[in-house]
Amino acid sequence: MDKTARITRLVLPGHTNRHGSLFGGTALSYMDEAAGIVSTRVARGPVVTAHIDSVDFKAPIWQSEAVVVKAELVDIGTSSMRIRVDTWGECLEEGTLRHCTTAEFVMVAIDQHGRPRPIPKVSRDDLAQDVD
């Protein structure tokens, strides 16, 4: 089972603030999407975002760059998972990446009534693989 996800999107004018950089809310949306992909794979069913821990915006991602979002499972509990999510700004012309944002998402597996449910067992040796 893949415990990672990678999303790449082009930053277009409608995604930027008046300074020409990616809206923070848009970045968080992409990050939540990547965390949701990883946690749904692990939980083998529906999940919700329960908590986002310490979002650090370290650098802007500019219009016309690509935003690269990398997510990986780092810990798992009975019904919850911690997913580390990083964003990178990619200058497509130069082929360079700059680390821009980091956060940890806590995702919870839920049943058909929206209540927490157990996650299938995952080996701790399988946690925190690299995302290429």
Image (tube, rainbow, N blue to C red):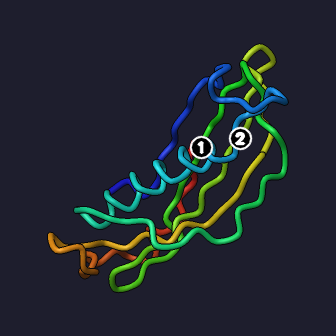
- In this view, 19 is above or below 13: below
In-image side of 64 versus 121 (left or right): right
Residue displayed at 50% across by 72% down = 106
Task: Locate residue 123: give its quadrant.
Answer: bottom left
Element on which disc 2 rests: strand
Q: Which kind of residue does numbered mark 1 sit on? A: Val
Give the residue type at disc 2. Answer: Trp
Q: Secondary structure at mark 1?
A: strand
Query: Residue 88 got which mark?
Result: 2
> For mark 1, does the 10 Å Cα neighbourhood hold few (<14), some (14 to 19), or many (20 or more) residues?
many
Residue at image location 25% in from the left, 81% down from the top: 118
Horizontal side, residue 76 vs residue 43: left or right: right
Task: Find residue 71 and report its horizontal and vertical position in percent.
Answer: 54, 53
- Residue pushed farthest top? 93
Q: Residue at x 84, y 30 (%)?
A: 19
Q: Identify the residue at horizontal 84%, vertical 51% (top origin).
A: 58
